[in-house]
Image (cartoon, helix red, strand yellow):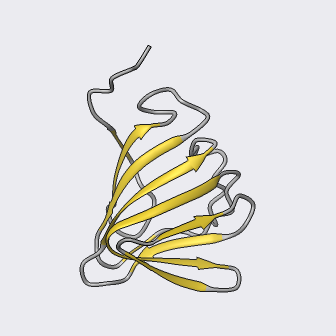
Amino acid sequence: MATLLSGPSIVEAAGTKPKRIEEFFGRVNSGTEAISIARMVSPAGWMEPGQTPEFDEYTIVLRGILCVETGGQTLHVQAGQAVLAPRGEWVRYSTPGDDGAEYIAVCLPAFSPHTVHRDQ
């Protein structure tokens, strides 16, 4: 049977400025551990700590530019583009542009603060 969710849960974000995370599917909003799907709205100048997650993160940028730093490269992912950050590899996200960014993040398995392994 199909399940209707009335809306997302707002999840607290890590980083230098407030970022809005609207989780539609995941551990918080739907009790789903297999996948999380969230809409992110990041302000200009936002940056989160680096992380080495235990999940694959698929990101689709809807508006603005998302900067994705890995151990060996820096990608500037623009609206209409997507990026995969594989599990077990260090990554850091930021939105250095004047307009910030809006994007969809899909994590397999679902995001968890216990499996993201943020830098201290």
Residue at the top extreme of this rendering: 1
Q: Quadrant of the N terminus?
A: top left
Q: Position of residue 2 (x, y in %)?
A: 41, 19
The x and y percentages for residue 19 are 34, 60
Q: Is residue 66 left or right of residue 7?
A: right
Which residue is drawn at the image coordinates 26% and 27% (left, top)? 6
Location of residue 16 with respect to 117 vertically, above or below? below
Residue at left offset 51%, top offset 42%: 36
* Residue beneath the point at 70% across and 85% down: 72
The front one of 30 and 79 is: 79
Q: Residue at x 71, y 58 (%)?
A: 87
Nearest the viewer among 17 and 72 is: 72
- The outermost residue toward the right is 88
Q: Nearer the viewer, residue 107 or 46?
A: 107
Looking at the picture, how far across and down is residue 46, in whole percent? Answer: 37, 73
Q: Quadrant of residue 8?
A: top left
